[in-house]
Amino acid sequence: MKARRLIALIAVLFLFSCLPKKPEIPGTEVPAGPFVQALERQRQAFTGLKALASVEVVTRGKKRFFDTVGIVLDAQRRLRVEAFGPLGQSLIALVWDGKEVLLRMQDNDRVMRPGQAGIEKLLGMSVEAKDLCAIFSGTITEITRPLDSRAFCTQKNACVIELPEGDTERRIRVLLSSGGPAPSVRIADQELYRSNTLVYRTRYERMQEVSHILVPRTIVIENPEKRVMITIEYTETDVNENVADDVFTLSDQGAEVK
């Protein structure tokens, strides 16, 4: 009996040793406060987005490409993503109205309420709706535990800010454009870990300034474990414009974003 218990204990310890570990953050630890404040200023300065994009989704080697996708954000409160066909018909529409996720597919005009599973169905990975707003806007979600944050910098003007929250941890890599007590930062990429496991990684490329707000033209989201990579290329972008409330509704009739 003791031998069986010992074997079982060894097996459990072996399984835990095989779990993926978060990589160590290189660089020298520095005060995180100025970076946290700079990231929060960016988040608060962004109030909305209306954009057209092309989207490529690669899942386990299989590609899907959408030439025209409308993306509308109300800060990090509401969201609409809609893919259109060559004749302007709605192929897929996903809406988060701040409370629930609504989904309508081309092969079924009925509006479904799949919750978080609706986002996972489209992306092939689990991403919270509020996180998706932050990803699309090139910002971060609200920092709920700023005093627990840490920052590490290298000599190449690049820093990583570690933001713990419950059983999750975000790592935001920023590039510095100026020094001083209130540095100006540009988010280069961010990672979300849950219990030491990478949930997703996001990279931002080809930054541009729109209405005095810095937004990415290319966004790459990936989950290596599930072999999912999503590439979003913005073709038209309007920032901080008013968005009508009815954009964040979804009907069985197939209303489209104008």
Image (tube, rainbow, N blue to C red):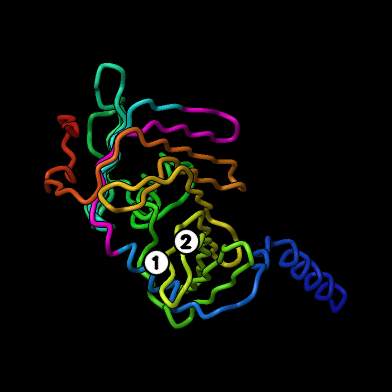
Position in image of residue 244 (x %, y %): 11, 46
- Residue 39, numbered label: 1
Position in image of residue 142 (x %, y %): 35, 68
19 is higher (above) or lower (below) than 235: below
Query: Which residue does the image show at 75% across and 66% down from the upper left?
Result: 17
What span is in magenta?
44-64
Q: How many marks?
A: 2
Camera-side residue: 174 or 146? 174
223 is higher (above) or lower (below) than 47: above
Quarter of the view holding residue 228: top right
Query: Horizontal placement of 20 versus 53: left or right?
Result: right
Magenta stretch encompasses residue 197? no
Disc with the residue nearer the chain's start (1 vs 2): 1
Magenta stretch encompasses residue 54? yes
The residue labelled by disc 2 is: 177
Q: Residues within 10 Å of mark 2 (few under 14, many from 20)?
A: few
Image quarter hosting the C terminus = top left
Three-letter amino acid code of the residue under disc 2: Ser
Camera-side residue: 95 or 134? 134
Query: Horizontal placement of 113 versus 256: left or right?
Result: right
SS under mark 1: helix
Position in image of residue 245 (x %, y %): 12, 48
Residue farthest to the bottom?
Answer: 147
Overall secondary structure of the magenta section: strand
Three-letter amino acid code of the residue under disc 1: Leu
Image quarter hosting the N terminus = bottom right
